[in-house]
Amino acid sequence: MAIQRGVAYSIAGASPRTFGAVVLTNDDWNENMREVGVIPLYLEEPDLPSPMIHFTARRSLWAVPGRLVAVYKEILEAGLLDLPEAAMNSIEGSLCELLALPQLCTEFPTAPESCYSRTEYPRWSEIYYAGEPVGDERKRYVVVSHNLWNSTSQGAIAVRTTSQQRRHGAEFPAIQGGAARACCAQATHISPRAFTLSVYRRPPIRSLSLRDMSSIAQGIVQSHQLQAALGRR
């Protein structure tokens, strides 16, 4: 089954409250790669932080752009509907704001505003280990959602980084002076519990430069086909 951007699919094993998920990654990526980027759609208003997009297609649905996740195509089942253009525009616009793309995808990029919090949380531009180890290796992620969201939303959107140089193309921009690449199409929401936040258990390189974050932002624009949305901003 060909997976297409803008189409909502049912999800294997989803809860009764979940309608499905709409695909955000571009169709070239969807055709050639195993994982695709999706945003879940709910049948009733979820108890999750805003921004939340409410729209009516064949029925009333809610989308939470901050819950962008990368999933294996195998869990996507039947195509349910093409999302209305207005709903897609709203989802794309909210995602652009959460990822600070208007500030970062310019000739003179600027960092999103900082945010003070009494509790520790995954912070924009910083690198963490997250998820379960794969053998002896921990996966490294850089946080790409802005700190106001990260400090209040029970998680953050992050992009995996890799030292494997066989990755190439706009979706894999070079970072750290070419020593690593960012896997932009695999941007995914990660819960705070999955991040290793302890300063003593962080990767040797703990943050990326503004220039690297701008490169990642441009990679996400390409991988998730947000050029028109960024233009509307």
Image (cartoon, rainbow, N blue to C red):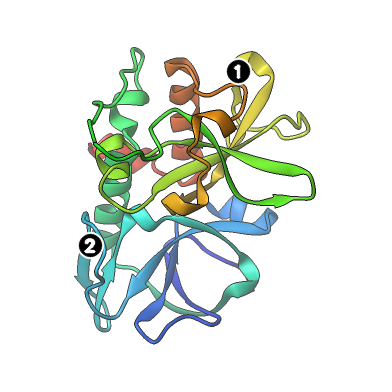
Q: Is residue 30 above or below residue 163?
A: below
Q: Give percent across and percent down for residue 122.
A: 41, 39
Q: Is residue 190 visible?
A: no
Q: Earlier in the sequence, mark 1 or mark 2?
A: 2
Residue at 78% of width from left, 44% of height from top? 136
Q: Is residue 105 above or below residue 25?
A: above
Res. 53 mark: 2
Q: Which residue is mark 1?
A: 176
Residue 206 vs residue 44: left or right? right
Q: Give percent across and percent down for residue 165.
A: 76, 28
Q: Give the amino acid at mark 2.
A: Ile
Q: Quadrant of residue 2?
A: bottom right
Residue at 31% of width from left, 33% of height from top? 100
Mark 2 nearby-residue class (10 Å; few <14, some 14–19, many ≥20): some
At numbered mark 1, what does the secondary structure look like: helix, strand or loop?
helix
Mark 1 nearby-residue class (10 Å; few <14, some 14–19, many ≥20): some
